[in-house]
Amino acid sequence: MDGIVFKVRDGNKVINKTVYLAVGLDRTGHKQVLGMWGGKSESAAFWMGVLTDLKARGVEDILITCTDKPIRSVFPQAATQVCVVHQIRNSCKYVVYKDLKAFTKDMRDVYGAINKDMAATALDRFEEKWGSKYRYAVKSWRENWDDLTTFFGFPMEIRQIIYTTNLIENLNGKIRKYTKAKLSYPSDDAVKKSVFLAIQEIEKKWTMPIRNWGIVLNQFIAIFEDRIRL
């Protein structure tokens, strides 16, 4: 689940509005856009409304969600993975250029570790080296640690799907190509129509399941045996 920002006219001014998208994988491993919602700002409360809407439309269970904020309502059994790529971007936002290369290399040792214990050790080293200079970056990793490291509890093939929202960010990038000619939109409805038409064209090319789906599905069945119905 992720959002994409557009410029929309509101009276005499142009403001940012976000279209939020949820993409899921069906039982054959194919991607599907589950819904599209409009709003001004992203928050846990907003995403709770999105999940409530999905439940009302018939979604019975979600195994894993990948977002840039932790979500634990509506589908309490769902494992939540906060997007690591979003975390990296947020951590690097205030790092001075001369430190950026070394900073990102040390951060890679955290999320690229073999398991959660080794990641925790790498985070300790990261904090020892950078904590005094970039306190907020380390603090954000500590505060979101459990949700950032959910993927360590799964086999490698599943990890590659869930540790980042790249799947939906790739969709967002393609939507941008279809809508880039429009600098701003006259209304919320105009944005939604434009995004909807772009999604229709993009989904025509989603003809193949994700990589290694057969392996992934068997792993899901082994882990979530009592929750999967095929």
Image: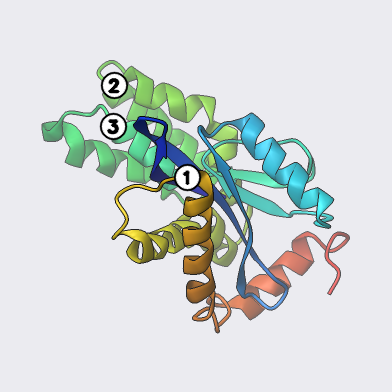
The residue furthest front is: 12
Q: Residue 137, can we see it?
A: yes
Q: Residue at x 27, y 41 (%)?
A: 104
* Residue neighbourhood size for the residue with mark 3, other residues' Cα within 10 Å, grouped as few (<14), some (14–19), many (≥20): few
The CA distance from mark 2 to mark 1 is 41 Å
- Say which label, 2 or 1, has the lower sequence index: 2
Q: Which mark is residue 93?
A: 3
Q: Which mark is residue 214?
A: none
Residue 170 x %, y %: 42, 62
* Residue neighbourhood size for the residue with mark 1, other residues' Cα within 10 Å, grouped as few (<14), some (14–19), many (≥20): some
Element type at mark 2: loop
Q: Which residue is mark 2?
A: 134
Q: Type of residue at label 3?
A: Lys
Element type at mark 1: loop
Q: Type of residue at label 1?
A: Ser
Q: Which residue is mark 1?
A: 187
